Image: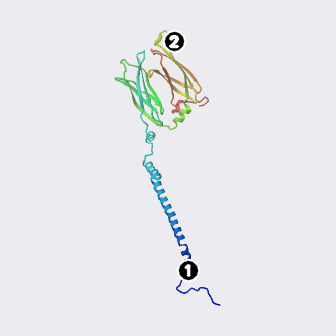
């Protein structure tokens, strides 16, 4: 029998190599198309990636990075708050006014504002000056954020007092971060029924040269207080025409005080009566012990 099977000759192509060559020759066009297709897909991917990178950098990431740089270089500290925490701001004087009464005496009053949220002035020593007139020094306290009326009442002077000023001789400061919560919890004194009655309405013998002011004060808190002042201010329009201070030595929780006093000077009916309770709630000595406590 004759053997027809192909036997490779040394140095010649093998059967498998010939088959591979034949397959390649037959599929060369397809392979070329596949390679071109893959290259096109790769180009599209690279171009898309480049477009995305360009868009992201200039329209998305760059603004964010710029904002980040700006945030990093912009100071975040609240220097006003730091200044207030570290040092109290000075008191502001809104106005100083002198009121002459019928007895030839003068009432001097200054509206003083504590602009500090965290600082309390337990002791403010002050006096008034007007030319050669210098009043005696007095002492008061001013709570955080309080508008306080510092007064010298019934000051006798042979000469007229004009254009007075207030001088703060000395002031001590204490930081208190709990005042806001304490104020809401403790300070609840209600003023109702403020009333002004002229001398004619009262049927007084000296006619219109005297009048009466009355109001009701209710301690609607759970605390008993020592030394509560009621600052009474009468206005005609925006002008202050009368001031007075009514002291309460003791004001018990749940107590109502009906106050009235006579003004021995000629005052026409005011357009507004303002009664401002004032008690130093940051001073433990202002609180009277409950019944049964030692």
Q: Residue at x 42, y 28 (%)?
A: 94
Q: Residue at x 47, y 10 (%)?
A: 207
Residue 91 falls in which quadrant of the image? top left
SS type, badge 2: helix
1 or 2: mark nearer the eye: 1
Q: Position of residue 2 (x, y in %)?
A: 63, 90
Residue denoted by label 1? 18
State the residue position of label 2.
201
SS at mark 1 in the image: helix
Looking at the picture, does residue 40 appear above or below residue 24?
above
Label 1: few (<14), some or many (≥20) within 10 Å?
A: few
Position of the N terminus by quadrant: bottom right
- Which residue ends up furthest to the top in the rendered image? 205
Between 154 and 27, the residue placed more toward the observer is: 27
Give the residue at x 54% y 35%.
181
Any mark on residue 200, and which? none
The reply to whether the C-beta atoms of the residues labelled 1 and 2 are less than 8 Å apart is: no
Toward the viewer: 194 or 63?
Answer: 63
Location of residue 52 in the rendering, given as x and y in whole percent from the top left corner: 48, 56
In this picture, residue 262 sits left or right of residue 161: right
- Counting from the top left corner in percent of width and height, residue 125 is at 42, 29
| Mark 2 closeness class: few <14, some 14–19, many ≥20 residues within 10 Å | few
Spatial CA distance of label 1 from label 2 is 134 Å
């Amino acid at each position: 029998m004759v053997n027809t099977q192909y036997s490779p000759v040394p140095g010649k192509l093998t059967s498998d190599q010939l088959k591979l060559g034949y397959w390649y020759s037959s599929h060369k066009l397809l392979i070329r198309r596949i390679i071109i297709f893959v290259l096109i897909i790769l180009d599209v991917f690279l171009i898309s990636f480049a477009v995305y990178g360009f868009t992201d950098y200039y329209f998305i990431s760059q603004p964010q990075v710029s904002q980040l740089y700006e945030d990093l270089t912009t100071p975040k500290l609240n220097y006003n708050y730091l200044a207030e925490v570290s040092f109290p701001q000075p008191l502001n004087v809104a106005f100083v006014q002198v009121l002459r009464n019928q007895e030839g005496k003068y009432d001097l009053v200054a509206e003083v504002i504590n602009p500090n949220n965290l600082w309390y002035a337990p002791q403010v020593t002050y006096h008034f000056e007007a030319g050669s007139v210098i009043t005696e020094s007095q002492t008061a306290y001013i709570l955080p954020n309080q508008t306080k009326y510092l007064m010298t009442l019934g000051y006798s002077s042979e000469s007229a007092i004009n254009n007075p000023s207030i001088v703060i001789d000395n002031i001590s400061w204490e930081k208190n971060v709990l005042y806001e919560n304490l104020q809401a919890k403790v300070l609840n004194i209600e003023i109702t029924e403020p009333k002004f009655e002229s001398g004619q309405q009262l049927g007084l013998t000296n006619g219109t040269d005297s009048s009466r002011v009355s109001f009701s004060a209710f301690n609607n808190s759970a605390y008993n207080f020592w030394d509560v002042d009621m600052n009474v201010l009468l206005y005609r329009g925006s002008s202050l025409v009368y001031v007075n201070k009514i002291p309460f030595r003791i004001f018990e929780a749940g107590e109502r005080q009906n106050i009235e006093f006579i003004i021995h000077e000629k005052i026409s009916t005011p357009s507004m009566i303002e009664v401002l309770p004032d008690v130093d709630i940051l001073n433990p000595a202002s609180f009277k012990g409950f019944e049964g406590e030692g």
